[in-house]
Amino acid sequence: MKAVQTDYLEVTRPEYVADYKIRVGFNDGTVRLVDFGPFLSKARNPDTTDYRDLQKFKTFRVENGDLIWGDFQMIFPTTDLYKGEI
């Protein structure tokens, strides 16, 4: 699908796939498969390492165009998600 021109980039349709992978849709029509596994395996902050629990990891949501977990314990720059780099 060809990307649509937008003034800003936001997450619109995240979908859990498997393990620590989420298919992330953006408001320009782009979709990326993002693997959070490597990030979580290196994480040392207890607020972040809690999300190694898959049930807790699956509790992500979109708020104001951002993909977040909990009370902002995990949030990533939308442009990094768009590039598939976290």
Image (cartoon, rainbow, N blue to C red):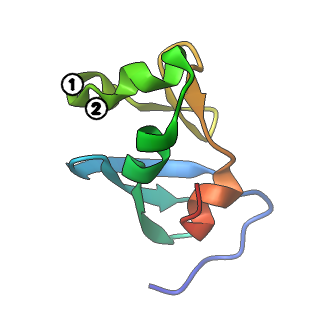
Label 1: state its secondary structure.
helix
Could you classify mark 2 by the number of other residues whose Cα lies within 10 Å: few (under 14), some (14-19), or many (20 or more)? some
Say which quadrant the C terminus sits in: bottom right
Give the percent coordinates (x, y) of residue 74.
55, 28
Residue 78: percent from left, percent from top = 65, 51
Where does residue 22 sit, x and y in percent of width and height?
Answer: 34, 52
**In this view of the protein, which residue sits in the foreground, 4 or 14?**
14
In the visual, does 85 lie left or right of 38?
A: right
Question: Distance between the Cα atoms at labels 1 and 2?
Answer: 5 Å
Relative to residue 6, is residue 86 drawn left or right? left
Q: Nearer the viewer, residue 57 or 6?
A: 57
User: Residue 14: which numbered mark, if any?
Assistant: none
Q: Quadrant of residue 23?
A: bottom left
Secondary element at image label 2: loop
Using residue 32 as the reference point, say whether residue 16 is left or right of it.
Answer: left
Q: Residue at x 44, y 68 (%)?
A: 31
Q: Is residue 42 above or below residue 26?
A: above
Q: What residue does disc 2 label?
A: 58
In depth, the one of 45 and 61 nearer the eye is 45
Dots 1, 2 in contact, CB < 8 A: yes
Q: Above or below — where is 62 with respect to 82?
A: above
Q: Quadrant of residue 40?
A: top left
Q: Amino acid at mark 1?
A: Gln
Q: Amino acid at mark 2?
A: Lys
Q: Which mark is residue 55?
A: 1
**Residue at x 43% of width, y 31% of height:** 61
Q: Residue at x 53, y 60 (%)?
A: 26
Q: In the rendered view, would you say 4 is above or below 82?
A: below
